[in-house]
Image: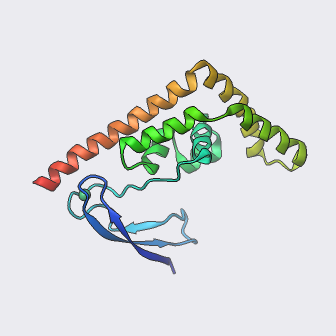
Amino acid sequence: MPRFIPEQSHLCHVCDTRFTITTTFDPRAADPRPASQPRACPRCGAPLRHTGGKDIGAAKNIVLTHYGLSFYRQHFGSVKDFLLRHCRTARDVDDYLALVERLDFAEWESDQRRSAARRGDALSAEERAEHQIVPKARAEAASGKLLADVRAAADEAKAVLSEERARHLRAAKG
Ligand SMILES: [Zn+2]
């Protein structure tokens, strides 16, 4: 049986209609993900969008997704997908961009060195891959390439949000 998560009040990011969503989660499903009903705003038809946590962890997830690490690719898809899953508005997208911009790659690398020294062979294959990516990310952050690439993905996500907003606002008025 699916599990029911308590009903939540949801505010549409396009037309500001407030409505109740019911979410179920079936841990035994082939692809266990929470599923919400309704799946779109009853007034304008915009899909449900949520804002994710805005912290250093999210910024690191964006970087590792950008470099295509398998776990992150499977979990988040592309950087554009990540942003569309965690942003309601272009301002949210800018917040994530700013977090990536402020990442301290030197600190990230030294955290990893400490972790490698402490855990040695206990590191998973995924963690080892991550340890190889961070020095590259640090170099590309220094040259400006990383931020340019992430900004390009952010622009694509903003274009989707903007087009969605225009289309569903028309539907709400019609
Ligand atoms: Zn709406």
- Colour scheme shown: rainbow
In this view, which residue lies farthest toward the left? 174
Instruction: State which quadrant residue 30 falls in.
Output: bottom right
Q: Is residue 12 above or below residue 71?
A: below
Q: Quadrant of ligand 1?
A: bottom left
Which residue corresponds to the image point at 31% horizontal and 54% vertical from the top-left? 13
| Whole-percent x, y for residue 25 in the image | 50, 71
Q: Is residue 89 above or below residue 49?
A: above
| Whole-percent x, y for residue 50 in the image | 42, 56
Q: Is residue 144 left or right of residue 22?
A: right
| Whole-percent x, y for residue 57 in the image | 62, 47
Disc tally is 0
Which residue corresponds to the image point at 86% horizontal and 50% vertical from the top-left? 122
Instruction: State which quadrant residue 125 falls in.
Output: top right
Question: In which quadrant of the rendered image does the C terminus lie?
Answer: bottom left
| Whole-percent x, y for residue 29 in the image | 54, 69
Which residue corresponds to the image point at 27% horizontal and 61% vertical from the top-left? 41
Q: Is residue 2 left or right of residue 171?
A: right
In this view, which residue lies farthest toward the top? 143
Which residue corresponds to the image point at 53% horizontal and 48% vertical from the top-left? 54
